[in-house]
Amino acid sequence: MLDEKQGVQLSEKVSNPEHTELPLKPDAKVLNTAKDSRLAQALLEERPNLLSKNSIKLFCVLFVSYLCSAQNGFDSNTFGGVSALPDFKAQFGTNIASTTGFLAAIYIIGNVIGSFVAGPCADRWGRKVGMFIASFITLIGAIVQASAENKRDLIAGRVVLGVGTVMLGPSAQSYAVEMSHPGYRGLMVGAFQACFFLGTIISTWVEYGLSFNNSGSTINWRLPMALQALPSIGVLLFVYFIPESPRWYMAQGQQEKARAILVKYHGNDNPNSKIVQLEMEEMEEVISTTGSDKRWWDYTALFKSRSARHRTFIVLCVGFFGQLDLPPTSYYFPLMVQTAGITSTRSQLLCNALQTPIMMISTLAGIQFIDRWGRRRMLMTSSVCMTICVAIIIACTATQTGHAAIGLTGIAFIYVFLVVFAFVWTPCQALYPTEVLTTNTRAKGLALNGLWMNIISFINTYAAPVGITRSSWRFYLLYLIIDAVGVIVIYFTFVETRGRNLEELDAIFDDPHPVTASLAMQKVVVREDQMGGVLVQEDEKA
């Protein structure tokens, strides 16, 4: 740690970025750019307050995008629950594992189709219009699915629903990251992914409550499916009243509109805010008004340079390891607990309903630490714990015959796995890929990630029920290997994005060794000394 005198000297240098000679200890590393200190100094002088009037307004604005996340959370647990109901099985034939897998996976076919238009839609007409169009399509899909009388109608509804929900991602995720305050980006975007569970909590507990209805009415499965329309209706009602993303405005050459939004939501209505000035300078430097986002067909910016390929690789890795960590429990939790010895439909639905609030609580707890501990360290630690959990699940499932306690232990570790996953991976699945991508490639990169995730998810969703039914515990060995490999990939390729403005990440990815560069960045301690400066110390390796 620098002494007080050195801290004062650094404060003077920070006010004049032309100075490059920092009064550090002989063995200390020098900050790569003046921006490192400028951002910390700006946050120090204009301390953001989550309880301020403007911060509350910002959360209200972001909540519209959070509803899009809730919409994505509705289907998986909803369909997983209704597929276990006797009335639904009788009407659509889901008592056969391959049929269940097909009806679950056909939704992902819609996701794949929608992925091709999701990015260009968010780039061409803006994040707000993208959310509106996607929500309208989702509403139509939910109506068709809930009113289905035969398998053909159900398939049609699920395909349309899949198209709409995947289109929500590039628009809503980009909006959440681009509108979030730089001092609380991890928390604000983590809350976006936490809202994924709002829909699942409603649907799974409604399903559990309706399991007590023995009248044989189709309301037992139609009502949960109809509830999937609620988030879409909310977005359609309120999206008109929120501002457009300031970074989208910058990409369109409308700097003054971008500045006005930043002043209101990041600068506490102060037109001279240093945070706003820094954000505007960096956006003007980095965001192109003639980039590939103006050409709906052009995806080359995701691959044309080494740094672009590295960014894209990280995004695809998050999608891959986030999808193939375990069989999709949201769809197949009833089947998984049945394999562990729980045969009562009501008990299966209760187990299915419990996983969602547990994961939401874990996610809300995890987002408190994302900005403190860093993305890379948390992802790596989580993956190690997930690997251990899967190993225990395999051991319990393989030896549970005749030993009820061992089977229950396996189920317990499924919940432990979900807690560990939700604590880190759930918020980072939305936050980290969106941070890694540049503004001009963000929507298309997220759309490509959506396509990739849904191809992986389609295979996982369709294969899981057959694999669990035929191979039992042996099927889980695949996930054990994938989770272990994920730890290695994260260690060698994932960069740390904590404490950086979105535009500042360019310097990290342009470095010949991005991972090393991101870890070598010094930690700026936002703490006043006697002269109001900032102190610099070595950051521990993340």
Image: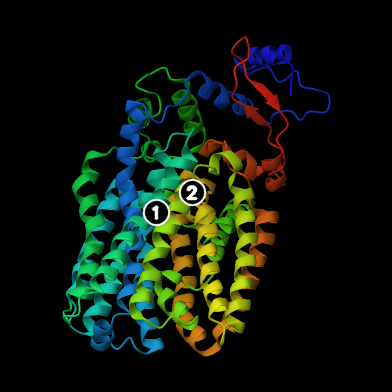
Check disc 1: other Cα within 10 Å, few if <14, some if 14-19, many if 20+.
many
Give the number of the mark in front: 2 or 1.
2
Percent position of residue 496, x then y: 62, 45
Identify which residue, 239 or 133, lies in the foreground. 239
* Residue to which mark 2 is pinned: 431
Secondary-structure class at tag 2: helix
Amino acid bearing label 1: Pro
Amino acid bearing label 2: Leu
Camera sees residue 290: no
Check disc 2: other Cα within 10 Å, few if <14, some if 14-19, many if 20+.
many
**Label of residue 170 in the image:** 1
Up-down: is 270 above or below 280?
above
* Distance between mark 2 and mark 1 Cα atoms: 12 Å
Q: How many marks?
A: 2
Looking at the rendered image, the quarter that the N terminus falls into is top right
Up-down: is 259 above or below 9?
below
Question: What residue appears at the point 48 percent right and 47 percent down from the top-left corner?
Answer: 365
Q: Quadrant of residue 497?
A: top right
Labels 2 and 1: the sequence-earlier one: 1
Left or right of residue 235: residue 517: right
Q: Quadrant of residue 486?
A: bottom right
